[in-house]
Amino acid sequence: MKIVVYPHQLDIGGSQINAIDLGAAVRDLGHEVIIYGLPGALESYIATKKLRYVPAHRFAYRCGVSHIAQLTRLVRREKIDVVHAYEWPPSLDAFFGPGLLLRVPVVCTILSMSVMDIVPRVLPLIMGTEALAEEARLTQRGAVSVMEPPIDTEGDTPANDGREFRLIHGIAREELLVVTVSRLSIDLKLDALVDAIEAAGHLASSWPVRLVLVGDGEAAAQLRARAAAVNERCGREVVIFAGAMLDPRPAYAAADIVVGMGGSAIRAMAHGKPVVVQGERGFNAPFDPDHEAFFFQNGFYGWGDGGPGGARLAEYIAGLLAHPEERAFLGARGRETAVRRYSLQAAAAWLVCRYQEAIDCRPRRRSMLRDAARSAALRFEAEVIRPGSAVTTRDRQMSRAQPAGAAPLCELERHI
């Protein structure tokens, strides 16, 4: 089987790392995998996985005619069997290009915490949580399945050594280290990152605690300003920015406690670390026996009531700092859970079966044309009639801004 894997971007982030890791694992099962996407920091990561990479053209809009045309040419030239698109912009490029014009099956993974109205309803979807899958099944006509973000539990392991990481960042042996590994982005992440910084400030007067943020992004300047205020108030460097790391395993290994969400939380569990899971609007909760069922159903994320998340997070962290035996128990339980539920190798074998199902059950062209008209109309409405309008059920509820716009979906044949 020949597969194109199309992440929504190649900046450092959980969805795209997941796409690359799964692509390499599928390749190891004997299939040919090509990564296609905009150039970014993860190009070197793709190279370490020894995967073939085809860079996408730079473009001003999502989805864009030039992208659709380039992807269609690639799929036709390479005689691709399946395109696996991650998140909604690549799903539209793949659907309007190789899907509609060449009738090559398209599988779409959605790891963001919302079901996108604009995603064509005939596409088979892979959702990150059972709760999102249940929501998607209300509207999707294609198969909807669930894959929780898989982790390389052979590489993410308690055997990794974090001593050099602590030494580089001046973390003394007796200091207690809290780590978060995240894109420093405004969308989805900002609430949690602010909570982590504020929690460190609350804890610093009572504990020899340090917080290290690993990552980079458009919210970095804002977060650094907040951290500087906390450091000044505490009279010492409590919050440290380590920058982006292609391989953050030393950071996980160095931590006493990890705070984060999604795949980052699961990677921390694989390292045997106690985890406090974060979300938006002040959501924070530890991965422990009381919260396991919630996270298994809804994913390692959540929405709070808008209250003071930093103070709440500080309470959870303080409880763990005060009880080393509880940290050890939760770390061991997290490791066992990661190995049992999130194995990368098992996920790759499962994914190959979904690819074969997509080939065997590709939608009729009439259904695809109906979906093409519907998705194009939604994009036109969002970007021309009501600019900035939301395109998801949960986005409407949370008043989130619609991402940047789309080029007209017309005259494609002359570009291909």
Image (tube, rainbow, N blue to C red):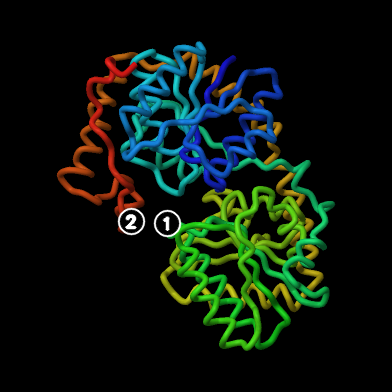
Quarter of the figure with residue 103: top left
Find the distance from the CA under tag 1 to the CA under tag 2.
9 Å
Residue 110 x %, y %: 47, 39
Q: Amino acid at mark 1?
A: Asp
Taking 194 as reference, is 93 left or right?
A: left
Quarter of the figure with residue 407: top left
**Residue farthest left in this picture:** 385
Residue 142 x %, y %: 41, 26
- Residue on which disc 2 sits: 400
Which one is closest to the eye, mark 1 or mark 2? 1
Taking 223 as reference, is 273 left or right?
A: right
Q: Is residue 398 above or below residue 132?
A: below
Considering depth in this image, is 165 or 182 the residue closer to the camera?
A: 165
Residues under numbered marks 1 and 2 in contact, where contact means CB atoms less than 8 Å apart: yes
Image point (48%, 59%), residue name? 189
Viewport quadrant of the C terminus: top left
Q: Which tag, 1 or 2, sits closer to the chain's start?
A: 1
Q: Amino acid at mark 2?
A: Arg
User: Taking the image as drawn, is residue 12 in sight?
Assistant: yes
- Residue on which disc 1 sits: 187
Residue 64 x %, y %: 32, 32
Quarter of the figure with residue 278: bottom right
Considering depth in this image, is 294 or 104 the residue closer to the camera?
A: 104
Q: Is residue 133 above or below residue 333?
A: above
Taking 123 as reference, is 261 left or right?
A: right
Image point (52%, 23%), residue name? 4
Q: Secondary structure under badge 1?
A: loop
Q: Is residue 192 above or below residue 374?
A: below
